[in-house]
Amino acid sequence: MIGKLLGHMQVQTTARYAHLAAEPVRMAVIEIAGTLVHRGAWIGQSSGLTSYEGIAAQLQAAVADPAIRGIALDIDSFGGEVAGAFDMADRIRAARAQKPVQAFVADHALSAAYALASQAGRIILPRTGAVGSIGVVAMHSDMSGALDQKGIAVTLIHAGARKVDANPYQPLPETIRARIAGELEDLRQLFAETVAEGRGRRLDTSRALDTEAAVFRGEAAVFAGLADEVADPVTAFCAFAAAPRGTATLKSTPKGKGPMMTTASEDDAQPSASTPPEPASPAAIAPPQTTAAVMSCKARSARCCAPSRTTFWARR
C-alpha cells in the first residue's frame, strides 16, 4: 500500500526503495501481503502469496545497503505457515539493531504476520486496522464416512506405528488429537515468547498468552500493547522517512481522528487508560472457508489454511 500510494517501484528479491521528492532519502519498503509461506523467493504479488524467503532476501539487501536509512514493513496479511515464521521474526529483530524498522499495518497484521510485525521498533495501524491472533491452528479431515458411502476402502500399509497418525481415511483417535493439541500449545508458547522478544516491556509473554488469540483493532490494539500508534500509514511513513534516524512518529489524537507529530523511543511503554477496549468481535472477522484435502503423512507440516497442516491464521 505505502509503495503504491507513493508511486514507488518494486524490485524483485531486493527491497523496494522510496525516494521522497523534497529530499532524496532512501527507505526500504518491504511488502508483506497475502498468505505467508516458507519457500519461494520468486513468488509474485499476483499469486496472493509472500514467502519468508523473499522477505529475508529483501531485508538482507536493505541492511547491507549503506544508502538505506530505514526499513518499513508494509503489512496486510491474515497469516501463514508456521515453518520459517520464527526464524524470519528473529531476522527482523536483528535488523532493527542495525537500522530503524517500523511496521505499517494496512489493514491487517494477524497471526504469522503479527509475529513479524511485532519485531519492528514500532507498529502503526489505522483506526480500522487489526493486529493479534497470537495462536496456532491445525485441521483434520475425516473422509472415512464419505468413502464408505461410495464403497471405497482405503488400506494403509506402513512401517512404524505412528507413520499414518492423523491420516484422513480414519477417525482421529483421542490420543493422537491430544498429542497434536499439545504440540500446538507448545507452538503458541513459542509464538508468545517471540512476540515478547520484539515488544519488550510493551507486551510480555504472559500478556501475549492472555489474549487467547484475540484480534484487536485501532486504539484497542494500542491499549493492549500490540501496537504503538493509530495513524494513517502513508502519513506515518512520510514522517518516518523524514526523521533523522526514523525516530519521529505520528501519534493519533485521543479519538484517532488525526495524527500529531511527536518523538518516541522504540521501547515506549503502552498508553494508560481506565477501561480496556474490547477486541474485535467474531462477527467482524469470520474464519476462512476451506475444502477438504488429502492429508499427507507429515500432517503437521505447516501451511496457511490447508486443512491438513499446522498454521497461523486469523478469522477474516
Image (spheres, rainbow, N blue to C red):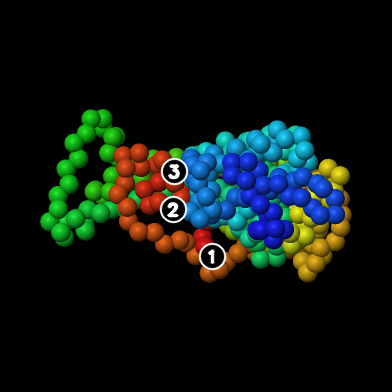
User: How far apart in space, not on screen, are marks 2 and 3 (Cα)?
Assistant: 9 Å
Q: Nearer the viewer, residue 48 or 268?
A: 48
Q: Which amino acid type is marked by label 2? A: Cys
Quick one: label 1 or label 3, which is nearer the N terminus?
1
Image quadrant assignment for residue 85: top right
Quick one: label 1 or label 2, which is nearer the N terminus?
1
- Label 2 environment density (alpha carbons within 10 Å; few <14, some 14–19, many ≥20): many
Is 225 positioned to the left or the right of 187 in the image?
right
Front label number (1 vs 3): 3
Quadrant of the image containing the N terminus: bottom right
Q: Which amino acid type is marked by label 1? A: Ile
Question: Would you say residue 110 is visible in this rendering?
Answer: no
Q: Which residue is the site of mark 2?
A: 305
Query: Is there CB contact under 8 Å for labels 2 and 3?
Result: no
Q: Nearer the viewer, residue 55 or 61?
A: 61
Q: Secondary structure at mark 3?
A: loop
Q: Which residue is the site of mark 1?
A: 285
Query: Is there CB contact under 8 Å for labels 1 and 2?
Result: no
Q: Nearer the viewer, residue 19 or 305?
A: 19
142, above or below 120, in the image: below
Question: Would you say residue 307 is visible in this rendering?
Answer: yes
Front label number (1 vs 2): 2
Residue at (44%, 53%) from the top-left corner? 305
Q: Which residue is the site of mark 3?
A: 302
18, above or below 193, in the image: below
Q: Which amino acid type is marked by label 3? A: Ala
Give residue 81's position: percent from left, percent from top.
Answer: 49, 45
96, above or below 293, in the image: above
